Amino acid sequence: MATSAWAALDYRVQIDAPRALAEPLERGLNLVRRRGDADMDEERLKRLVDEAVRESREVAATEGYFSARVDATVDPSAQPWIVHLAVQPGPRTHVRHVEIQFSGPAASDPDARSRFDRVRGAWLLRRGDPFRQQDWEEAKRNAVRELAGWRYAAATIASSRAAVDPETHEVVLELEIVSGPPFRVGELRVTGTRRHDEKLVENLAPIRPGEVYDREKVVLYQRRLLESTYFASVQAEIDTQAPADAAPLRISVIEAPKHHVESGISYNTDVGPRFEARYTNSDLFDTGWRSSSVLSLDRKIQNLQFNLDTPPRPGGVWNSFFARSKTQDIQGEVTRELAVGASHNYGASASPASLITSAHSEEQRVGGIVADSRYAIYFGAKKLFRRTDAFVSPREGYALSLEAGGSPEQLSSRQFLRGLANASLFIPLGRNIDILLRGQAGAVLSDSREGIPSAFLFRTGGDQTVRGYAFESLGVSQAGAVVGGRRLLVASAESTFWVTDTWGVATFVDAGDAWDSGVRPLLAKGYGLGGRFRTPIGPIRGDLAYGQRTHEVRVHLSVGYTF
């Protein structure tokens, strides 16, 4: 009878501890997991309670509490029995000093000094930070990854030590990283191609055999291959087991379906609901040419566009062609545009560039009356400079795009020259604060804006330009409408505090305007606060902004960044 009674023993666990300790204890203690065991008896329960005391001290130590006191009691008078676990963590241990040393060939390589500085500068556990085992392990992995990102691909930890002083509740962190040999890229080894030739993969490579290994170029290579629409998945890594002077770069791909159809409905506060449908053919007539047709409809913009791209040639060079029909109804101005064009693209490097030729014909209506008919054959060039720590949701780095071009008098209803620059600067302040600085400046040189297609003029305002104002509501007033002008200036400063890894709170100040001539020193200002939520497609941004010029408060919803 006794055995049967003990076999039926049931209990519940009460944990009295700070939340930072209670949650991992509830997830990880064997005492919690073994509840409901059919063979549980008093003796087994006692062993589990003793084990829980030891496990609790270990969990507390991983969170930086090395002098935790743990008390456990069992109340057999309750049904079920109650096991009470009380954890008093005591003072938390903080980092007093960090010492990072390097050994191996990199130690005598003068070119590696800047890399050492990057490793130390990116170190995650700073002096004064609370010590956590998880943060310690993450900091070590990040340090090795930072060193292994250039030349020394096989870098690894030689030794590490966290020396805790129980009297002062401080810890000294010591880390030695051995670099391994310097690596140079050997041949490209491509696997996974079925329909496409391996040369197509090799033609987009920004890194060549014999070059020093650079992970940033490898990541860029992966991105270029995915952007080409030929492939659904790409993995690229250097073979660190091969001879370091010519280590193969292994490229594993999974080809995308030849035909791809997608559609969806999205929403943002600039244009409201939007329907978009897209058809892509990544191997037109089995030639390697790519085509796409895109239809997008919302209450302000209706656009139908057809694109055609040649296969990339060596050096990542290819040509693109497009045809477009577009209708816009924004701020009282209605435009209908037909456009065709071609571009010569240089896409393998970290700074892609394009040479552009396009023809535009447009009709403008203001107040229901045809105000202007315009045309232009445009010749231009565009170049992008970008270096960020992540592609979708960067925290550090910069992006800069420059565009210049024009149309001569013989090929347009109004000759003009045009320049536009966009810049974004990402600055992390510690682990939880991100600073984003944005700037935009543009100018059109012409004796009048009349006769210039609206695609080459400027308006601003909206979700990702000057918040606090309606979409493209800042521009030149004309007969009750807002139309494009020949000058543009936008500046923005934003700070985001990440409360958790995914949720953040932002404050911002925007200023900008578009006008037609001269200098506009009094820009329209907007400021406010908002929420941020990190997703795989970029941060979801919800902002509440006050427009100082209009004295209005507006809500802005958007996803990701515009570069």
Image (spheres, rainbow, N blue to C red):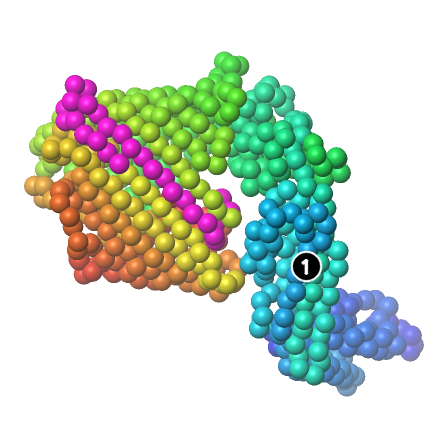
Query: Residue shown at 38%/34% (left/top)?
Result: 383
414 magenta-colored: yes
Q: Tell me how many marks there are.
A: 1
User: Percent x, y for residue 400?
Assistant: 38, 42
Q: Which residues are magenta?
A: 390-419
User: Relative to the observer, which residue lies in front, 166 or 266?
Assistant: 166
Which residue is painted at 68% across and 52% down in the image?
107
Left or right: residue 253 compared with residue 382: right
Q: Is residue 304 left or right of residue 360?
A: right
State yes or no: residue 452 in magenta: no
Q: Residue at x 28, y 56 (%)?
A: 510
**Is 265 on the left or on the right of 511, as rendered?**
right
**Residue 126 quadrant:** bottom right
Does 334 appear above or below 495?
above
The residue at the point 75 percent across, 59 percent down is 159
- Determine whether 58 is above or below 213 in the image: below
Q: Is residue 345 visible?
A: yes
Q: Please tell me how crowded label 1 is: few (under 14), some (14-19), or many (20+) other residues with Cα within 10 Å.
A: some
Q: From the image, which quarter does the N terminus lie in?
A: bottom right
**Residue 144 in the image, given as x and y percentages of width and height:** 66, 52
Quadrant in which residue 336 is drawn: top left
Q: Nearer the viewer, residue 444 or 328?
A: 444
| Residue 374 pos. (x, y %) | 16, 26
Q: Is residue 269 visible?
A: no
Please indicate whether residue 159 sits to the left or right of residue 355 in the image: right
Residue type beneath disc 1: Gln
Residue pointed to by mark 1: 101
